[in-house]
Image (tube, rainbow, N blue to C red):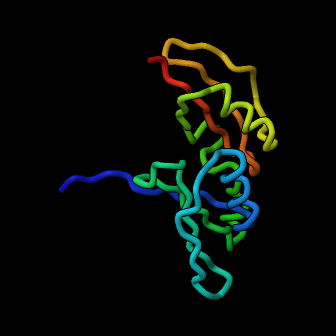
Amino acid sequence: MNPRIAMIAVLVRDYDEAIAWYHDALGFSLLEDDNRGDSKRWVRMAPAGNAHFSVLLARATTPAQTAAIGNQHGGRVGFFLHTDDFARDHARLTAAGARFEEAPRHEAYGTVVVFKDLYGNRWDLIEPRA
């Protein structure tokens, strides 16, 4: 057996607004958007050119799921997005309305900034040091 993590689910309020945000702000590609009936869809997105790991956009359907939207990691940074061009992706996120919690900073491991997505989930944008 050669296990690997292939996908994670992210609770969202609305499929279409989440698809738009992940595409416009993060530059993700839509891999699948299949209607599963009863208002459910199977929506997978991934960073462009990296379909080995994807995000399943899962519309919240219960009060407990709705309450977890934007706080799936208890207030901690839960998503780490690596980039090869920090300035380009920082500008893209800014234009798409990402909420930055700080100014970009330089750490031993690279350039990083914490931002919140449209639901309030915390992300690190990181350009690793070469």
Determine the image quadrant of residue 91.
top right
User: As drawn, is 15 to the left or to the right of 36?
Assistant: right
Residue 30, given in percent of the width and then of the height, sits at: 58, 61
Vertical placement of residue 29 versus 78, above or below: below
Q: What residue is at 72 percent from the left and 69 percent from the top? A: 63
Q: Residue furthest bottom?
A: 37
Residue 57 image-quadrant placement = bottom right
Give x and y (percent) for residue 84.
Answer: 53, 29
Locate residue 88, reporting x and y percent. 67, 30
Q: Quadrant of the C terminus?
A: top left
Residue 55: image location, x then y, percent: 53, 56
Q: Looking at the image, which residue is at 66% across and 68% down?
A: 59
Rendered residue at 60%/45% (across/down): 73
Q: Is residue 84 above or below residue 63?
A: above
48 relative to 121 in the view: left or right: left
Identity of the residue drawn at 54% across and 69% down: 32
